[in-house]
Amino acid sequence: MSAGALGAAAHIGGVTLQVGSLVRSLAFYRDLLGFTEFGRHEGGVSLGVPGGTRPLVTLVERAGAKPVPPNRRLGLFHFAILLPSRADLAGALAHLHSHGVPLGMSDHLVSEALYLSDPDGLGIEIYADRPRASWTKHGDELDMATEPLDVGGLMREPGVSEWRGMPTGTTIGHMHLHVGDIPVAERFYSDVIGFDVVVRRYPGALFLSAGGYHHHLGTNTWARDATAPASDEAQLLHWELVVKDRAEVQAIGERIRSSGGAILDDGAGAIIARDPFGTAVRIVGENSSGAASGADEPRTHHRLSTQGWTQLG
């Protein structure tokens, strides 16, 4: 753990996505997946779950935005929707299968997961954690793998019921990003932002977390010939990291500045920065007034030079 490590309370807040058709995306996220509409703003809609105080998915329309070329863009690999229980995951699987949604399925030892894409090709994981007491380690690293999902066992889980939308207690559990270089990603997300590295052994990937979680953030170099998304493509506009309070936000901001980076204060007790590959993260305190940022798109981005972080404007 580094001197600037994130506090144990750190977690993922929500994601803001640029989509090509708001009508089409609402049919997917609200009507099919079962998110609850929280509110509308110019050009977009925020979605969450019953009882939630923070939007989990904010959709921003850019009419006619091009779909994501599979595994060809830096930025979003997938965002991961964490359900409260294994029975909820079984219900989601039955629901999505009944609607003919193409799915990938994996057992990651620490969790069980479904994989799918939205209408714009943006990647999504829906998962449930195994009890933390069952997680094992190999030396200092958590044991994580990609093995076949025991679908039969999942569907026999006690308490499975008909899917009635995203249940209370659903969160965004983690983010997984395409990056251009693992050591550069580690310097930003671990040394500067403050995540702890939890898994290095996974080929082409690095997993990081706060508070001993299996991972709040995955990074990988699996995208072929990857470039940053063009402005007219569907994409992740930013993801949200929620920390304990405004003091921790300010401490992270100072680490970013000390590394030569630039940040944008969005005026709601939050800061926004881009990683070396152009992906934006919004960092906000748990009790800050800036619970979610709607359609705000960061106006600065950064690259890693031999002198450190350089603002490109």
Image (spheres, rainbow, N blue to C red):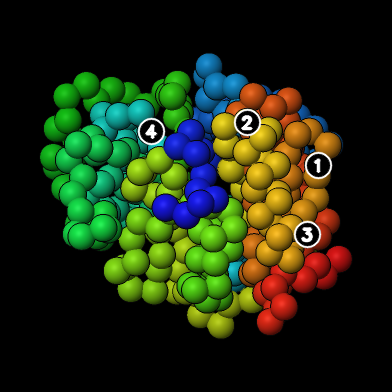
Which mark sits nearer the N-terminus, 2 or 4? 4
First-in-chain label (4 vs 3): 4
Q: Nearer the viewer, residue 231 or 310?
A: 310
| Label 2 to label 4: alpha-carbon separation | 25 Å
The circle on residue 262 is: 3
Residue 83, numbered label: 4
Q: Residue 144 occupies which quadrant of the picture? A: bottom left
Determine the residue positioned at 58% across, 53% down: 193
| Real-space CA distance between mark 2 and mark 3, rounded to the nearest whole angstrom | 21 Å
Mark 1 and mark 3: Cα distance apart in space: 13 Å
- Label 2 or label 1, whichever comes before in sequence order: 2
Q: Reading the chain from its start, which is encountered first: label 2 or label 3?
A: 2
Q: Label 1, on which residue?
A: 266
143 or 152: nearer the viewer: 143
Label number found at residue 245: 2
Is 206 located above or below residue 116 in the figure?
Answer: below
